[in-house]
Amino acid sequence: MSAPVSTLPAPLPTFVALLDFALSIPTHRPLPVLRQCSMSKDEAEKWFIEVVPRLADLVLSLPALLEDHYKNAGETGLRLLKSQQSGMVVLSQELIAALLSCALFCMFPTTTRGDNYLPPINFDYLFGVHSSGVIEDQSTELLEVDFADRYLGGLVLQLGTLQEEIRFSINPELIIGTLFLPVMADNESIEMVDAERFSNYTGYDLTFRFSGDHKDNKCLDSMGRRRTRVIAIDALEQPGSTQYKPESLVREANKAFCGFRLNPNVEDEMGVATGNWGCGVFGGDVEVKVVIQWLAASEAKRAFVLYYTFGLEVLEKLGPFVEWVEARK
């Protein structure tokens, strides 16, 4: 990941510290609740009788999981990363599940997260479970673009349901990155590998709904994890007419290149799956963003680009345009 590495005085708060913090929450601060809940009686019974106890077991397993993790992790151990210093964190699925369980129960201290430019990690802003986008529907391993907020995950824990938030909802292991990855600078991207997908969905934004369990059939790597690569790159927000100025064009091209550049030590000739990055609520010109991403992928020597237009009328002639350019090589 192209985000920073630093060694904390203590690797992470111990479970006892997390528990003490949870018990010290003032009684006037409500714990998260499911409002406007659409669970049936059977679903509610399964949630409280089967799921919640299993989540509690995961929380209780955290001390042993962390001890085993730090015993074997070396330089890839869990720690806060800092801007402008590259680094990598490797976590097992079981450890991610335990950490996410702590987040669900709002057990992580929050007082210094803003000072470290970290996004929210606790689930205390969630009030319900919302019941396909195509970038994530890849049967083979591609570099799949996350239209990211500069704070990783965007509003995934605060009712956001746009492209990034949806991706983090259906691949929830991605959420754990918000625990230790700070805000991205203009020359940084974040690559997340081997996150399994668990959910299907329909709709987008206000129509986004969970539509059932997903069976992830992607190939496994040597560690038994699904071969998925998600690259988070944040675009300029509401740039207006300034997006056509050289400094803005260079910034966006550098950001895309930072995400697309090939690492010959760990990747084959892998293509990129992307779409209307930095458009929609971010306000970017979709035609400009197409060209910027194409140039960045070419400079990064990516084998190909799969571009999803999401049905935008302005991009109906993108296919013929690509053919016209290819014919003039």
Image (tube, rainbow, N blue to C red):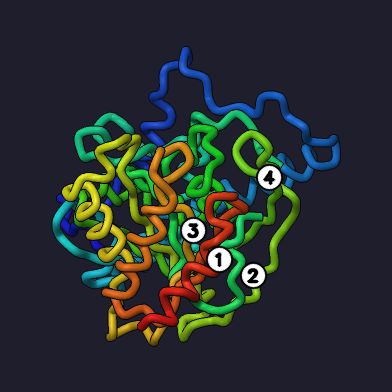
Residue tagged by mark 4?
203
The residue closer to the viewer here, 318 or 163, is 318
Q: Distance between the Cα atoms at labels 4 and 1?
A: 21 Å
**Position in image of residue 213 (x %, y %):** 72, 58
Residue 1 in view in this figure: no
- Give the residue type at disc 2: Asp
**Position in image of residue 320 (x %, y %):** 54, 69
Q: Label 3: state its secondary structure.
A: loop
Question: Within the image, what quadrant is residue 107 found in?
Answer: top left
Residue tagged by mark 3?
275
Q: Label 2: state its secondary structure.
A: loop
The residue closer to the viewer here, 302 or 108, is 302
Q: Nearer the viewer, mark 2 or mark 4?
A: 4
Q: Nearer the viewer, mark 1 or mark 3?
A: 3
Q: Distance between the Cα atoms at labels 4 and 3?
A: 17 Å
Instruction: Verify CB contact (< 8 Å) between mark 1 and mark 2.
Output: yes
Of mark 2 and mark 3, the one earlier in the sequence is 2
- Give the residue type at disc 3: Gly
Residue tagged by mark 1?
196
